[in-house]
Image (tube, rainbow, N blue to C red):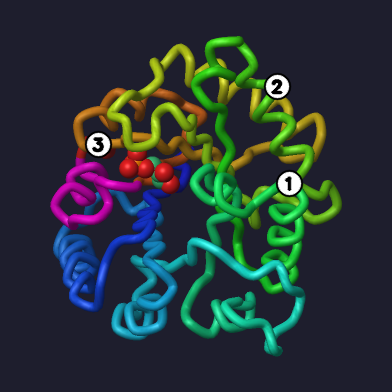
């Protein structure tokens, strides 16, 4: 069976109005090339760019997401600095990244993450839920324990299904470092995650992504991990050339 492979660009705190060119180049590439059709491309630019980008790129080939959402369960109101699910949806977002380790460091604890996930789901935004262990947890052999705790403390059994949730495993020690786990390590993690999601959430075919220093070179190795349904890409997603090359190499 051909499964959909996700290539999600997390631009983090990068980009300006001219960066639309990078998305246009990706769009032009796919219009001209019939590269494997079982793929989903999602750009998550900073939220100030979301509306203009999603208005300019109207195509089934490319979707948009946001990197954050307010935990306040209201559409509008006197909440300085907050972007509600409604505002984000109106700006063109269909997905939202929640639980990224860079956000956990600043202001996302387990409770906040759970609140954000539930608000996003209520508003029909799909979740890109990030989990990952840090280096010392990895060295102590605690990776799976950490991941399971992150999942259990944030995902509500009644609301989650395979269609509204993407889980991105992003080991913190791999983000922006150029260090990518071995396929053996990743195989073990993904096999256990799949089993755990079946046991606890009755999700049979979860969408599981890998993120952390993904490049056009290492994607040719990472694609051999059968349980991976795609990638959450930071640095290499900022330029169309490297992003397109990742996708091309995956399907080579
Ligand atoms: P890099 O691809 O830059 O390592 O970032 C990964 C990431 O954090 C994506 O969310």
Task: Tell me the CA gap for discs 1 and 2.
Answer: 15 Å
Is 247 part of what is drawn in magenta?
yes
For the residues bearing labels 1 and 3, Cβ distance under 8 angstroms: no
Q: CA distance from mark 1 to mark 3?
A: 30 Å
- Image position of 160 with respect to 29: above or below: above
Q: Which residue is mark 1?
A: 110
Q: Is residue 98 magenta?
A: no
The residue lying at 56 percent from left, 33 percent from top is: 132
Split into 4 quadrants, where in the image is the C terminus?
A: top left
Q: Residue at x 43, y 68 (%)?
A: 64
The answer to which of 69 and 219 lies nearer the viewer is 69
Nearer the observer: mark 1 or 2; the answer is 1
Residue sitting farthest toward the right: 158
Q: Residue at x 59, y 46 (%)?
A: 104
Looking at the picture, does residue 82 appear above or below residue 213?
below
Asked whether residue 206 appears in the rendered view, the answer is yes
Q: Position of residue 189 (x, y in %)?
A: 57, 21
The residue that label 3 is drawn on is 215
Is any part of residue 5 visible from this angle?
no
Question: Which callout, 1 or 2, points at the residue further toward the start of the chain?
Answer: 1
* N-term-proximal mark, 2 vs 3: 2
In the rendered image, residue 196, in percent from the top left (x then y), is placed at: 73, 28
Please determine whether, in this image, residue 143 is positioned above or below residue 48: above
**What secondary structure predominates along the stretch shown in magenta?**
helix
Residue ID for mark 2: 145
């Amino acid at each position: 069976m051909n499964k959909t492979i996700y290539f999600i660009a997390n631009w983090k705190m990068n980009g300006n109005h001219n960066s639309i060119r990078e998305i246009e180049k990706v769009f032009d590439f796919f219009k001209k090339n019939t590269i494997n059709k079982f793929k989903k491309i999602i750009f998550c630019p900073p939220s100030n760019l979301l509306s203009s980008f999603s208005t300019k790129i109207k195509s089934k080939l490319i979707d948009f997401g946001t990197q954050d959402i307010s935990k306040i369960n209201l559409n509008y109101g006197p909440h300085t600095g907050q972007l509600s699910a409604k505002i984000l949806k109106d700006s063109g977002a269909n997905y939202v990244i929640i639980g990224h380790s860079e956000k956990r460091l600043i202001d996302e604890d387990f409770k906040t993450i759970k609140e954000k996930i539930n608000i996003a789901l209520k508003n029909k935004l799909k979740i890109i839920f990030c989990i990952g262990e840090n280096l010392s947890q990895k060295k102590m052999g605690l990776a799976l324990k950490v991941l399971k705790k992150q999942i259990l403390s944030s995902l509500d059994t009644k609301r989650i299904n395979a269609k509204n949730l993407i889980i991105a495993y992003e080991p913190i020690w791999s983000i922006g470092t150029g260090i990518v786990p071995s396929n053996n390590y990743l195989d073990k993690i993904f096999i256990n995650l799949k089993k755990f999601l079946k046991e606890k959430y009755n999700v049979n075919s979860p969408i599981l992504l890998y993120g952390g220093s993904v490049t056009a070179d290492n994607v040719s190795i990472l694609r051999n991990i059968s349980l991976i349904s795609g990638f959450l890409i930071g640095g290499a997603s900022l330029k169309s050339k490297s992003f397109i090359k990742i996708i091309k190499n995956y399907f080579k």
